[in-house]
Image (cartoon, helix red, strand yellow):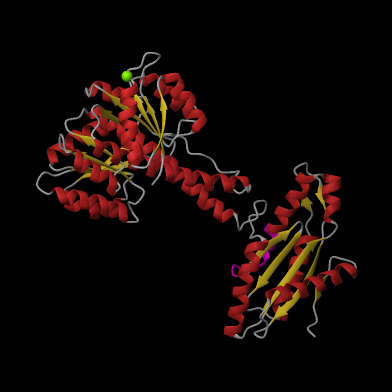
Amino acid sequence: MPGRILVVDDVATNRLILKAKLAAAYYDVLEADCGQSAFDRARKEQPDVILLDIMMPDMDGYTVCEMLKACPETSHIPVVMVTASGAPKERIKGLSVGADDYLVKPINDMALFARVRNLLRVKMMFDELKLRDSTSRELGLTDFLETIEEGAGKSETVMLAPAADSQGDVWKDAISKMPNVDVIGSCSEREALNMARFEMPDAIIVQQSIMQEGDSLRLISALRARPETRQAVIIYVVADGAIETAAKALDLGASDYLMEPFEPEEMIIRLRTQLRRKRYSDQLRSNVRDGLKMAVIDPLTGLYNRRYATQHMQKIVERAQESGKDFAVMMMDLDKFKRINDTEGHDAGDMVLKEFSRRIQENVRGVDLVARMGGEEFLVVMPDAGAMTAKHVSERLRRAVECNPFVTADGVELNITVSIGVSIGTEKDDDPGKLVKCADLALYEAKANGRNLVSFHEAA
Ligand SMILES: [Mg+2]
């Protein structure tokens, strides 16, 4: 997994050491020797991870981190603080300005690489989701989507899997103080997997149990593999100095780890960062899902679009071949629609299209396919419907348009009519395109004969 890493340190030797280590592992390394140049390079060159020294002459690492997190061009880039002091207070300060982790000099290689791999994985996932989301947006598919404000939705749930109940109680006390977060239960490692499947928590905190080290790592990889917890935050709590186990946990899919002893505040900050990240990725994921849905839906009317209709008609044809039952294909076109747009404006035109869609849906069955084929042209396909049913339904649709005027937002009443062309498919038909063409020919005939008419295509 290649990646570009920006190493920030005012001491050239420190940069050289880190650069040698990272380059040996095939990472691309960029360097900066002060806070300002770190910020500039990050904006211009968009590294995947930033390793940030704290003590620097121009400005300290905390300030640089705050600047990076406040700038939209760099706020998504993960930051790891690198410092000589491992005091809990320093650590909490670094995490609370938005750093993703904190490494103490001299840097342990295993801790460094496991963390870099973890952050690169997260960043790649985000980059991919953002790319798909932006594609959907560029296609105009998700314009209406709202973003969820922090804390606006339901509360988030955190499940605890401590090594001992007393430990769980201490964590629970701390986490319960977070707004909109519920601790849903404290349980043993063994019960954790079952409980997680039922409760589907947003976050799970797993403690490395001294007696069964292997089990807690297996638990992490099992949680990552299960669909119910695949997207959950997993924080691993390891014993003092157990850096190898922590590194393994990150590689198995843990989101973050905490090394004992730690202040409850550190747990809360790390949990909050991870939950925020999860909310964002959930949002992106649902945008992408909705974007896919919108690829087959006409945004104005909410009906299926031509792409979907063409695809789905093939299935209706195949089903008719199996059942031996006829099906009806109706093409509809609002009469002189262009005139409405020209004289009443496009808003009125849109209202007519929406209201027409509503009236169609009101007059057909749930199993019938209704689609907007483009402009003021609509398609209805009725499975298991012969000429008699088609005649009945198409006449009803024609009257549903003619008999009640369409009312604009300004209260103007518009008298509108529709022309309908119908073709009937049989078990012998295997080309949906041909049936649509036949319905289209019948539609032309209805138009030619004076509009506001239903016309049937006479099979040769
Ligand atoms: Mg320094």
Question: Is 361 part of what is drawn in magenta?
Answer: yes
Nearest to the observer: residue 379 or residue 213: 213
Q: Is 328 within the magenta?
A: no
What residue occupies the far left of the structure in this picture?
Answer: 211
Residue 391, image x, y percentages: 75, 76
Q: Residue at x 29, y 54 (%)?
A: 198
Residue 447 location, quadrant: bottom right
The residue depicted at 82 percent of the width and 51 percent of the height is: 414
Residue sitting nearer the eye, 39 or 162: 39
Locate residue 294 relative to residue 358 in the image: left or right: left
Secondary structure that dominates the magenta span = helix
Residue 72 shows up from this direction: no
Residue 10: quadrant of the picture: top left
| Figure quadrant, ligand 1 | top left
24 displayed left or right of 89: right
Tag count: 0
Q: Position of residue 138 (x, y in %)?
A: 62, 45
Please indicate whether residue 454 sits to the left or right of residue 134 in the image: right
